[in-house]
Amino acid sequence: QVQLVESGGGLVQAGGSLRLSCAASTSIFNFRLYTMAWSRQAPGKQRELVASVANGGNTYYSDSVKGRFTISRDNAKTTGYLQMNSLKPEDTAVYYCNLFRPAYDYSGQGTQVTVSS
């Protein structure tokens, strides 16, 4: 069974940085074929797609994080990353990673990011 484990969340002051990691269990087959995405959910709000990176390397960023967040992946380590800079209080949320490709969709349990003003 494939597991995704997010880490790197925490409490940071506005303007600070955090780097989230999403490690997939080694049982995943052909990690490189998956699209990796990060989404977030703040209290009382719907989950929002933040960024994604496709198997070919194409990236997507929501307007709210463009220019501040960078998504990346290391296929050899079956791990993805979300570098978050210039954090704002409105970035406070639980951040989730997921991997998907046709017929496969895996999600992690989330990691809390709290940005204080």
Image: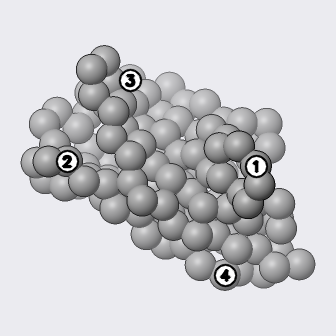
Q: Calculate the distance from the C-alpha at mark 4 to the C-alpha at mark 2.
A: 29 Å
Residue that badge 3 annotates: 56
Residue type beneath disc 4: Leu
Q: Nearer the viewer, mark 3 or mark 2?
A: 2
First in sequence: mark 3 vs mark 2: 2
Residue 90: % across, % down? 83, 60
Residue 35: % across, % down? 39, 31
Residue type beneath disc 3: Gly
* Mark linked to residue 11: 4
Can you say whether 10 is above or below 40 in the image? below
The reply to whether discs 1 and 3 touch (Cβ–Cβ < 8 Å) is no
Instruction: Identify the image quadrant of residue 17.
Output: bottom right
Q: Which of marks 1 and 2 is in front?
A: 1
Residue 57: % across, % down? 43, 29
Q: Residue at x 49, y 72 (%)?
A: 8
Residue type beneath disc 2: Val
* Mark linked to residue 25: none
Q: Nearer the viewer, residue 38 or 57?
A: 38
